[in-house]
Amino acid sequence: MAGPVAGSLAAWATLWAGHALELPLLKALGHTAVLINLFNLVPVPPLDGGRIVTAFTRTYWAIGYAVGIVALLATQSPLLLIVLVVGLFSLVQRWRNPYAALALALAATLAQ
């Protein structure tokens, strides 16, 4: 989780600096970095989000998905819609077979 957290902090700092200094280039870089970090957190295995979600129980997955739906209704963000659609597939897979995600995580660890 350190990579996404550090990347998000840097992206938000760049975006803030762009607004504070009124520099369009920094604003654009900040927005781009925020979007890349959000995409990286999509809960599918090759991305960081796919690795992070394996640490959560099925109950927290369901709660997080409900919060995501509320956020989607409030923001109407197309990127959040994509995350929720992809996340729904992962949620269903984990709900049906919670040990498959654990086995995949173990296999990925051993392969490295």
Image: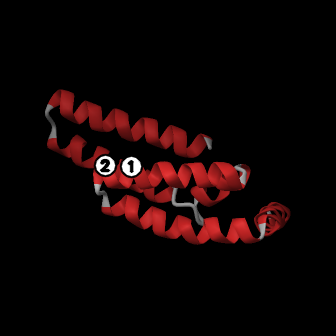
Report if residue 45 is visible in the image. Answer: no
Q: CA distance from mark 2 to mark 1?
A: 5 Å
The circle on residue 71 is 1
Mark 2: give few (<14), some (14-19) or many (20+) Cα within 10 Å. few
Q: Which amino acid type is shown beneath numbered disc 1? A: Ala
Q: Can you say whether 19 is above or below 73 in the image?
A: above
In this picture, residue 24 sits left or right of residue 56: left
* Mark 1, other Cα within 10 Å: few <14 / some 14–19 / many ≥20: some
Label 2 with label 1: CB-CB less than 8 Å: yes
- Residue 91, image x, y percentages: 62, 65
Q: Is residue 40 above or below residue 23?
A: below
- Tell me residue 82's x, y (percent): 41, 67
Q: How far across and how far down the image is residue 36, in percent?
A: 41, 56
Residue drawn at x 79%, y 69% is 100
For the C terminus, the quadrant is bottom right
Query: What residue is rendered at 45% in x and 41% in y?
Result: 8
Drawn side of residue 17 relative to residue 82, left or right: left
Q: Amino acid at mark 2?
A: Ala
Q: Secondary structure at mark 1?
A: helix
3 left or right of 57?
A: left
Quadrant of the image containing the N terminus: top right
Residue where numbered disc 2 is placed: 74
